[in-house]
Image (cartoon, rainbow, N blue to C red):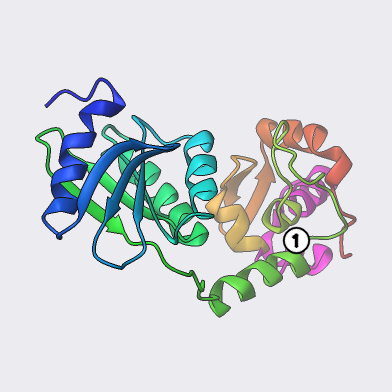
């Protein structure tokens, strides 16, 4: 089944609801689909060919009529399909909306039903966020900035090591760690995530040309050694 318009989604959605005992009608008032069963609250479904902000706006507006509001879209396909579906499913759950996806053969999949959302807090993620907060020295990033990259605590540690090598030439990892306060200096230079360091002897590292350029590019965020 080719889904070229929203009306192509209507028959599968109608069939899904009718199998559950609903009487279904399309284009009732401002709603794309309305289903009614006995004395229960009506079910409203908004149809779109893709996820969009306007689709969520429409669905939220329908919550003033009933708590049983779904959005229905063709199931995404392509490389980023799973990520797209996962992100929009999370959005539906947070907004208390249901989500139905329609497959090319006309089958439907109910990804979630409408209902109140109580997100579970992750202590692990919170602890990781606060560790990065504590590790980051000063406030080197403007909120929302992406143009020149983001300064992380890891990058600040790498900059400390690079600055020390630029001033003191090749050095032992333990000496760099002691002078800069970067306890993991040896491992950081060995991993060489940015390409700034090269091993010149056992436990001894030097700054590469790329490292020198990195110091210039990130000079504004280079923390003082040992701070």
User: Nearest the camera: 141 or 115?
Assistant: 115
> Which residue does the image show at 30% across and 28% down from the upper left?
6
User: Nearest the camera: 181 or 48?
Assistant: 48
Q: Residues within 10 Å of mark 1 (few under 14, many from 20)?
A: many
> Which residue does the image show at 43% across and 37% down from the upper left?
29
Q: Give the secondary structure at mark 1.
A: helix
Quadrant in the rendering for residue 207: top right
Location of residue 62 in the rendering, given as x and y in whole percent from the top left corner? 49, 49
> Which residue does the image show at 76% across and 53% down from the upper left?
156
Q: Name the residue under label 1.
A: 176
User: Nearest the camera: 220 or 93?
Assistant: 93
Location of residue 181 in the rendering, given as x and y in whole percent from the top left corner? 80, 68
Q: Give the range drawn in magenta.
A: 158-184
Was residue 197 drawn as part of the magenta stretch in this picture? no
> Which residue does the image show at 47% across and 70% down from the upper left?
116
Q: Residue furthest front?
A: 39
């Amino acid at each position: 089944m080719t889904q070229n318009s929203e009306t192509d989604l209507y028959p599968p959605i109608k069939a899904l609801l009718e199998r559950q005992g609903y009487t279904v009608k399309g284009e009732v008032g401002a709603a794309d689909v309305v289903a009614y069963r006995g004395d229960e609250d009506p079910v409203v479904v908004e149809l779109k060919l893709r996820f969009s902000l306007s689709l969520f706006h429409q669905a939220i507006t329908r919550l003033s009529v009933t708590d049983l509001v779904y959005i229905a879209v063709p199931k995404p396909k392509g490389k980023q399909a799973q990520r797209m579906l996962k992100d929009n499913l999370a959005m539906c759950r947070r907004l208390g909306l249901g989500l139905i996806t329609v497959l090319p053969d006309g089958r439907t999949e109910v990804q979630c039903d409408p209902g109140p959302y109580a997100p579970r807090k992750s202590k692990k993620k919170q602890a990781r966020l606060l560790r990065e907060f504590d590790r980051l020295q000063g406030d080197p990033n403007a909120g929302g900035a992406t143009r020149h990259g983001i300064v992380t605590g890891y990058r600040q540690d790498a900059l400390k090591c690079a600055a020390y090598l630029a001033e003191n030439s090749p050095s032992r990892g333990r000496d760099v760690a002691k002078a800069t306060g970067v306890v993991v200096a040896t491992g950081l230079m060995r991993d060489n995530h940015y390409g700034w360091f090269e091993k010149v002897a056992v436990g001894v590292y030097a700054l590469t040309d790329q490292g020198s350029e990195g110091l210039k590019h990130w000079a504004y965020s280079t923390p003082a050694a040992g701070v």
